Amino acid sequence: MMHFSRIMIFFLGLQLAAAGLAPLAEAKETKRVLILYSQERGHPGHDLTEQGIRAVFLSNSFFDVQLYNEYLDVTRFSGPGQISLAADYLRRKYSGMKIDAIIAVYPYAVDFLLAARSPLFSGVPIIACETLRSYAENLEHSPVRRLVTGTVVDDNMTDFIAGALRMRPDTKRVALVAGTSPNDIYGEQVFRRGISAYAGKIETIDLTKLSMAETLSRVGSLPPGTIIFYESILRDGAGEIFVPREALSLISRAANVPVFGIYDSFMGFGIVGGRLVSFEQHGKEAAALAIRVMGGESPAAIPFGGDKAYVNLYDWRELERWNIPESSLPAGGVVLYRQVSLWNRHRAEIIAALLLILAEGGLIFGLVMNLHRRRKVERSLADSEERLSLAAASAGAGIWVLDIDTGLFWGTPEAYALFGLPPDSSVNFETILNLVHPDDRNIVQNKIWHATESDSGEIFSVEYRLVLADGEIRWLASNGRRQRLSQGQPLRLMGVTVDITDRKKIETEALDARKRLLHMERVLLMGELAASLAHELNQPLTAILSNANVAGRLLNSDSPDIDELKEIVKDISDDNKRASAIIRSLRSMVKMAETTRELSSINNLLADGISLIRGEAVLRDIHIETHFSDGLPQVLVDATQIKQVAVNLLMNAVESMSDMKGERRITVQTRSADRNSVLVTVRDTGKGFTEEEQKDLFEPFFTTKRSGLGLGLSLCRSIIESHGGRIWAENHRDKGATFCFELPAGDER
Ligand code: ADP
């Protein structure tokens, strides 16, 4: 009854401490606890154990515990000489100091204490931490039990093997890997006992006590239907010393089948997982036992613990590597190292996209491919992805995947940032589309639609504006392509998006400058025309007016002079003819204006014209296609004027599509009409014109545009006709207009 209440107080104390209270802090009595480890300092299992021990001592409310750590380093220093040396050392070191309890970790340390017992720490209670069940059972019958209690790494093998077989149901063989140190051999015995329950069903391949080189070569060529049980290798068959989990890492990398091991200190080093022995839990239990013993309980009265010191852990990367479904894991299993983001789940596709779009990505990947063997590359895929995403991130690019069937969108953190979305938020296509500027939504939607429909998997690119939460406009360019790796797999678009706001700013500025120039050109042209018209027509119009005034006066008189009136009417008619002649000569002046003509390639002139309006076309998402014939005769032309014709026709085509939905395309084609001339056609997918309009298209001042001058086409006609060619327009039945002109071949003339 007395023990029970003490235990209650102990646990109560733990809880209060955990709640941040320390009511008994001042009353704490100092106790000295020696932890005697079997292996060397830094042995991973020991580190975890120590964490557990420290955590409990630190939060206990009874004692102020001072810890002393000693490491026997048995794997490297064993043999009778070493034992007595170590015993001697400890005896001298701790003479004159009262140790209240010893926690001995792994059976070897317990053996050491008991063997060297008589003068060493005599009478001090021992907590044997992480011993085996059989070892504890032997102790039960020994007189030393009165001083020893502890925790047992329970013989959980049968269960553990059953768990492994659930994950790999086609297992027919178990390859057993263990080293030659006493600890390795303890573990190997546990494995063998556990596997004996499967005699006749599961064959054992003995890979124990081999050199590391041989172990690695054997684990790489195991037959299908095999799994590896790695116990531990502290020392291999060739006498070389290892840290067990580092040895595990080598083995797991070389293995062609999954590796299982039973200690949580192996997690992350290449085991699949299972119900694992938790060294930290053992440490906690051992420390709790030490507190009880130091509080006055007799060790003999405390049964060995450790039966709850398990954790149910699995390594996601290993599950992925060996295609082990998570449904085969027992309930409550915790999967560690999971890479949850879609970026990881779709790493193959994303890497493919990166390879496509980022030459650097390919370089890095190629480098990795060359540096490592294929298996190693698989293992280090996670590293490569990180580097690739870093490459994309440092280029400011966001990578994203859009699931067409569900509309779900996933992206790298950079992608979310570019779209102005909080990272990892749940987003679908609709959300993104709503952020797009209303004027650009059609373009984006069309592109996505085309890309999902196209079987060729060609890359699409689209430039569009995004309206950010603060109303600011951000220009983005997205390139992507459709992905369907095989039939039945979801249809996805994968792409890369970058911020092109700066580039757009520069483009817009250039465009504005060009527009101002063009406008000035038009104003000048108008001004010139108006000035010469005014000047030339002033004279006949003034004469017509004064003649008309005179005629008016004559008609108002009582007896108008009919002959004089006849003369006046004739003068008016003559002046009118003169005015018409002025207009005609003005037109012919435009026609005949002095020009410098040279033999030129029509294709080059058109290409120059196209380059002048390309910025405008990109801005309006218009695709310009050229079909230029080779081997056309040259034309003898004023290059500037012909370019002006090209620009006028192209700008008209651009403007004709400004309100159009759907495809926006201009096709410029050249071919030889007959042997003596070349034919140019500029076709658009715009709104075309009515039959009524067609008659006047080339007339000066005919326009259907709000701010049009109606001079472009008339000027084109003047220019083409002054070159001995002709120009005309055709409507299409389906959509858009074609403007054509023909020029005579230059070399013939
Ligand atoms: P402006 O462009 O100033 O109106 P133009 O002489 O270049 O003057 O064009 C005259 C008219 O011809 C335009 O207003 C338009 O109605 C029509 N037009 C010209 N090009 C096209 C085209 N590609 N598609 C449809 N209509 C056109």
Image: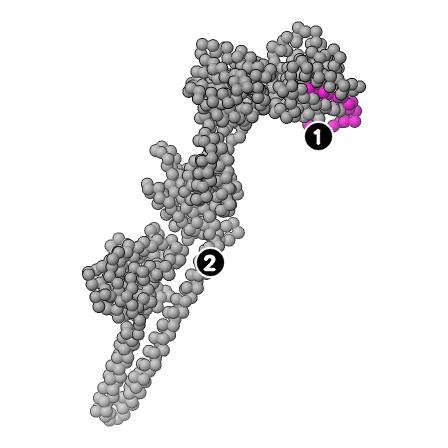
Residue, disc 2 = 506
| Amino acid type, label 2 | Ile
Q: Give the distance between the C-alpha atoms of the residues marked 2 and 1, in whole angstroms.
A: 61 Å
Residue 526 falls in which quadrant of the image? bottom left
Residue 311: horizontal and vertical position, in percent?
57, 22
The numbered mark, 2 or 1, whose residue comes first in the sequence reads 1
Residue at the (36%, 59%) spot, across then down: 611
Q: Which residues are magenta?
A: 9-38
Residue, disc 1 = 20
Picture colour scheme: one colour
Are the residues tagged 2 and 1 within 8 Å (C-beta)? no
Residue at the (36%, 75%) spot, across then down: 528
Q: Is residue 162 left or right of residue 127?
A: left
Residue 77 falls in which quadrant of the image? top right
Q: 171 or 747, which lies in front?
A: 747
Is residue 685 placed above or below 484 in the rendered structure? below
Residue 20 falls in which quadrant of the image? top right
Residue 558: horizontal and vertical position, in percent?
26, 93
Is residue 484 placed above or below 624 in the rendered structure? above
Residue 44: horizontal and vertical position, in percent?
61, 25
Q: Is residue 244 left or right of residue 606?
A: right
Looking at the rendered image, the quarter that the C terminus falls into is bottom left
